[in-house]
Amino acid sequence: MNREILRIAIPNIISNITVPLMGIASTVIAGRVAGADGATTIGALSIGVAIFNFIYWNCSFIRMGTSGLTAQAFGAEQHKKYTLMLWRSICVAFGVGIVAFALQWPIGEFSLWFMSTGDADSDNMISEYFYTRIWAVPAGILLFAFNGWLTGMQNAVAPMSVAILVNILHVGFSYLFSIVGSMGLSGIALASVVAQWSGVAVMVVIILLLYSRRLVKVSVKEVMDFSAMRRFFQINSDIIIRTFCLVAVYTFFTKASADMGDKNILAVNTILLQLFTLFSYMNDGFAYAAEALTGRFIGARDGASLRKCVKLCVVWCFVVSFIYVGVYIGWWRDIFSLLVDADTSNVEELLGVAEQYIGWIIAIPIASAMPFVMDGIMVGATRSRIMRNSMILSSICYFAILYGLGWLIGNNAIWFAFTAYMFLRGLFQFFMSHNLRDIYAEADR
């Protein structure tokens, strides 16, 4: 069972780690843009990325909804069903991507107004970044569909390979456009466009090469079957609400940091959040393993394997958490310094600000071990309602702490609220599934 878990988890960990590494590389490049203040550019980039996180994460229901249903069809060896899931996810992803692109002006203007820093130069950077990167949105959403389907098919290597390619292209073109071509933040945004559309092209080739013989012929009528699409959207509607809450938490984390009125706190919170993101993408690899194997064992009606899988995934997530705690305790200053240009005039000042809040980055991995694996289990079992309800409750707690204590303890309230939010997500899901007994019952039928 450990081999099965690691077979899916390790490629996903590798591909996941490339995402925050890309963010870190983008931050490093942004901090070195000629003729711009490093803290201002990094802060503008963080807000631009937060806007697109809001768009992308609200579309991640496509990956989650596709993964669980595909995994169950794979476990039950229903070839036609997982073929239909591929086409349904592509249709939904393409439709959502086109709608998001068509609505770029109202989305962009509202986002730029809502996330305004009050600094004209920073706001102009954010605007240029948004209206350049928006061309990548349809491609990014299509990649969600492909990744969800491949995860359900127990294939973690293909998404890993494409993710590595996309992020290498992104970093390379970011440097080329932003530093060599002197395009600033818009160069980083243009690099996203080139990289993600390249990823879509490569993903199509991979699926045709690996699965053309296993996919069966289906009609448009079957793909658009009302009852099947209704179930797909019923599951996804819960995930949409769940993801909206998730994105709201991350967005208000950045907004609350910006509202502190101190560009150093915004820059430090951005960098520290990236350190947490590096951890989260690591643990998400085991969440992906949990969702793929949970769906597979439920589809195969293999309760014994499901119980063993869940227990081992939980153990692996805590092992990763304690490793990260050790790394952050010993080397946080060295890691932080890598993200700040040594020639920046206020580098010591930024390190001094970071030292006040680094304790939260050490505490969060322990608080966050359970939410990731519980998300994976619920996705594989298609228990989307539990995911939705637990997220709503934990988000309410987050905002209560954020705005209830913000006036009293300042930036510490932002981090306390975020830590509590992560811990409560896992706790609520565990108890809402009756200590996972409801999930095990699915495989024992």
Image (cartoon, rainbow, N blue to C red):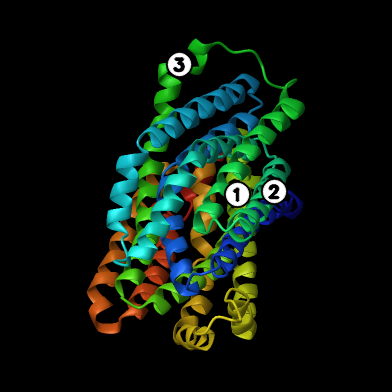
Name above or below for residue 248 compared with residue 101. below
Quadrant in the rendering for residue 179: bottom right
Of residues 50 and 83, the one nearer the viewer is 50
Q: Secondary structure at mark 1?
A: helix
Name the quarter where the C terminus is drawn: top right
| Residue topped by disc 3 | 225
Name above or below for residue 3 compared with residue 420. above
Label 2 neighbour load within 10 Å: few <14, some 14-19, many 20+:
many
Label located before the other in sequence (1 or 2): 2
| Residue 384 screen position, x and y as percent | 42, 42
| Residue topped by disc 2 | 8
The residue under label 3 is which amino acid type? Asp
Label 1 neighbour load within 10 Å: few <14, some 14-19, many 20+:
many
C-alpha separation, residue under disc 3 versus residue under disc 1: 28 Å
C-alpha separation, residue under disc 2 versus residue under disc 3: 31 Å
Q: Secondary structure at mark 3?
A: loop
| Residue topped by disc 1 | 288
Of residues 97 and 192, the one nearer the viewer is 192
Residue 445 in view (yes/no) = no
Task: Give yes or no for contact between labels 1 and 2 (Cβ–Cβ under 8 Å).
Answer: yes
Q: How many marks?
A: 3
